[in-house]
Image (cartoon, rainbow, N blue to C red):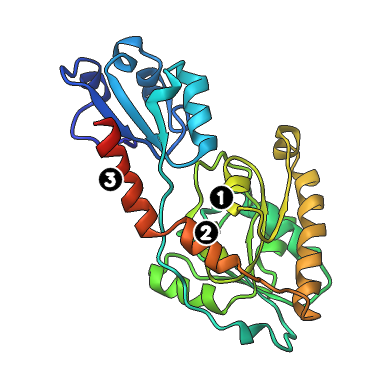
Amino acid sequence: ILPGQTDKSYAELIYEPKQIIIWLHNLVDQFGFQLYHLFTDKRFIDKVKYIITVSEYHRQDVINKTGIDPDKVVVIYNAIDPIDNDLSRFENVDVPQLIYTSSPGRGLEIGLTALSKLDVDFRLNIFNEIIPDLVKIDDNNKKILEDPRFFFYGKTPHKTVLDHMSRSHIFMHTSNWHETFCLSLVEGLSANCLSVYSTFGSLKEVGSGFGLPYDIENKTQKDIDKHVEVFSNKITKAIEMVKKGEFDPGNQAETINNKFSWDNFKNAWLDFYEKRI
């Protein structure tokens, strides 16, 4: 259930005569008061038979914010198709290819600010629906957006994005958003990109220990300058590793492809149905 993606208004769900099973993809307080009001209404919670969440981080958040019986909250990970890629792209790299594929409002301005200050050669390909305004267009932000190393592709077919992903060296996600799951990160890891990402929300769980994750606390999330500093150190290391030929993905793609496979997804739903319904 997501805002606007049910055939009934939220108010009607409170009076639904049958028990409800919810497949939830966002935090209960992430998209406005109406959804949060629904999930904190005891009349609605009493009708909920199960809530399927997309990560353990997500599950714990639902339990903490609704007070629902933990046995009623289940985790079923999302799934991806494995991304074919050729590791020979990491041989003799002069200009590392970076890629960003998440929403611009989830911390992209942090990554652009950090990268614009680096005196190294790279190319950053940015795929999302809008060009970020970095909050406001002042002279400094305009200079950042006009950095010749940044390439904005706007809204692009997913197949094209994945093709670029398979040819990229570094996936980056400077998230300051409470991610419940991140398909972009999973795809970056599946493509054997050296992935640099914050561990905010579920990203540490989803990243499964691969790449160069970095921790940010709530205070760091709000302190953009601190986040820029932390990310700068990690992305500088990643660029150096790629240029020196020091990155070895090992079993990264194999592990990610198995963990987030469609077979696991299907079997998890079948197991849920057989044991709980």
| Residue 100 visible, this orientation | no
The answer to whether 205 appears left or right of 25 in the picture is right
The answer to whether 267 appears left or right of 142 in the picture is left
The answer to whether 105 appears left or right of 213 in the picture is left
Residue behind mark 2: 186
Residue behind mark 1: 206
Q: Quadrant of residue 73?
A: top left
Residue furthest to the top? 42
* Residue 65 image offset from top left, x and y in percent: 50, 20
Q: Which mark is residue 243?
A: none
- Binning the other alpha carbons within 10 Å of mark 3 as few (below 14), some (14 to 19) or many (20 upward) gives few
Q: Kindly indicate whether the residue at mark 1 contacts the one at mark 2 (C-beta within 8 angstroms).
A: yes
State how far apart marks 1 and 3 are (Cα): 22 Å
Tag 1 secondary structure: helix
| Residue beneath the point at 81% across and 80% down | 244
Residue behind mark 3: 270
Answer with mark 2 or mark 3, whichever residue precedes in sequence.
2
State how far apart marks 2 and 1 are (Cα): 7 Å
